[in-house]
Image (tube, rainbow, N blue to C red):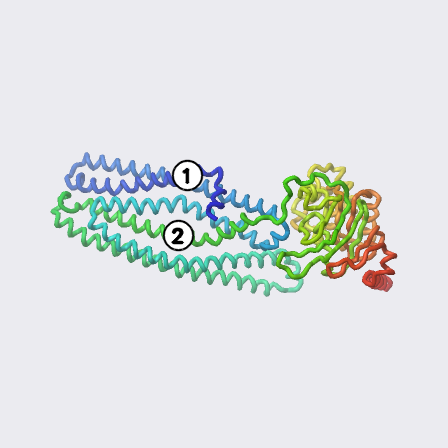
Amino acid sequence: MIKRLARCIREYKWPALLSPLCMAGEVSMEMLIPLVMADLYDYGIALQDMGYVLQKSLALVACALASLCFGGASAIFASKAATGFARNLRHDMFYRVQNFSFSNIDKFSSSSIVTRLTSDVANLQMTFQMMIRMTVRCTMMLVLALVMALRISTRLSTIYMVAIPVLAVALVCLVPMVFKIFDRVFKTYDKLNNVVQENVHGIRVVKSFVREAKETSKFKEISGAIFKDFCKAEKILALNDPIMKLCVYSCMLSISWVGAQMVVASGNQPEVGLTTGQLSSMFTYTTQILMGLMNLSMVFVMMTMSRAPMRRCYEILVEEPDLASPVDGVKKVADGSIDFENVSFRYSATAKHRALKEVSLHIPSGATVGILGGTGSSKTTLVQLIPRLYDVSEGVLKVGGVDVRGYDLEVLRDQVAMVLQKNVLFSGTIKENLRWGNADATDEELVKACKLACAHEFIESFPDGYDTHIEQGGTNVSGGQKQRLCIARALLKKPKILILDDSTSAVDTRTDAMIRQAFREEIPDTTKLIIAQRVASVQDADLIVVMDNGQISAVGKHEELLQSSQIYREVFESQKKGGDE
């Protein structure tokens, strides 16, 4: 897992290496300062040698300045490396998500993906920066201070050998407890993001049903759970501080007592015992050793907190897309013919229920095909297999006489334009939204596509015309206008197959008829699949497919189905009766 995430460092390897090297320089300078101070006390102040005092004072200033420069450089390199690592990690994760099939995306909720790309990556960025700075600093300070303390007095240094195991045991006991809590917290964050996302997206529904209090209660409950878990974790981590301070002050007292006795016993003679300057240095090294341990414990806590985000980001990076282009995929779609040959489909390998059951159907190129059926009859599932948004579970699906699994995915999907049941417009101008269908489309092509989709008239009625700004999700246009813009966007692809998944439901019957008439006259060679709830939308089709419970119930023209299909006849008569009334 760490090895895979480490690949995201890439071009920031040098800053990631230079930061700990500079930090090593900073710590080295800090280790020299107590030695210089000891000499200043013992050979300068004690002997009243002002020349020696000045010399050592300048050495102290030089060490401090060098430490400052090394520390500043380390901070700059660490910030650059951590920020670059986070950028590359987000890029890799987002790129991976873009290659996911629908089944891969179904595995991760949208709120979870957003959390992983934002909060989780931010946590890993902070942890990475701490690792290349604080981990190096704490480890080096601990080791070097211990070496220097042993160099001054082996006897006094044995005091550390009691404190260090106590702190290590405390750390080993606390970290596993905290990890379980933080693992639960990040899962709760997914739920929190999901509640916020649902509320903001459906704010009109919330207000129309006066459910603000209910939504507030849901948010309060989940945020309260996060608050409780964090408080619980902090209470456990808070035990680290008194244990650390107990060890620090116990060591200070022990060194003061034993060290003072050694100073007195030596008669202030360095070769016999301990000097005043050396005792002062021991106090400094004691603080550095124990503070290094304390900071190292906090680094471990941060790393513990980051284990859950690390695993969650890793899951995105290693998730293999279910759908991939074959190595030598077909680069050209011959025509718009479609053949379902005994096709069955399950949304997951473990699903017991088949969404589609043994579907066989031939659609000639250029035909207009209507698809009707009740809710849950798998109409959308049927057409989603054509651009290979999902792979068939059994059987073969061919487009242009070639199995869809043999096509290069980009080539296939570029020749199959699909206007989904849920129309999506992006923030930007109408032109920018339309050019999602063809980035190189001219203004004349935009106008032509909009005229075919009966969208040109209402676009021209806007003060800014095609430069009118569309809000995110198309909230500033009506449902019918949104549908027509999406149809125009699909037409700009100039596809061989056009799929309209109930995409004229918000359009009046007159406009619906105009759009279908324009399709017949202007794009006769394009295969058109129209999923509709209204019989009027498909009764002029070359072929009508009636779906029922994942199977094809009947196939034929309008007049034929009125005679042969009870489902079609019931739908037709119910709609005709409603129209008469």
For the image, the number of numbered tags is: 2
Mark 1 Cα within 10 Å, few/some/many (few <14, many 20+)? some
- The x and y percentages for residue 153 are 20, 47
Q: Earlier in the sequence, mark 1 or mark 2?
A: 1
- The x and y percentages for residue 147 are 26, 45
Q: Which residue is mark 2?
A: 300
Whole-number angstrom distance, CA of label 1 to CA of label 2: 21 Å
The one nearer the camera, 316 or 565, is: 565
- The x and y percentages for residue 26 are 34, 40
Determine whether 326 is above or below 572 in the image: above
Mark 2 Cα within 10 Å, few/some/many (few <14, many 20+)? some
Asked whether residue 81 appears in the rendered view, the answer is yes
- Residue at image position (74%, 37%) is 443
Which of the image's four quarters has the C terminus? bottom right
* Label 2 secondary element: helix
The one nearer the camera, 288 or 390, is: 390
Determine whether 220 is above or below 316 in the image: below
In the figure, residue 230 lies in which quadrant?
bottom left
- Residue at image position (40%, 41%) is 75
Q: Which residue is mark 1?
A: 17
- Amino acid type of the residue tagged 1 in the rendering: Leu
* Label 1 secondary element: helix
- The x and y percentages for residue 51 are 19, 34
State left or right for residue 471 relative to residue 173: right
Asked whether residue 467 appears in the rendered view, the answer is no
Q: Which mark is residue 206?
A: none
Q: Are marks 1 and 2 in contact (CB under 8 Å)?
A: no
State left or right for residue 345 relative to residue 571: left
- Residue at image position (73%, 47%) is 398
- Amino acid type of the residue tagged 2 in the rendering: Phe
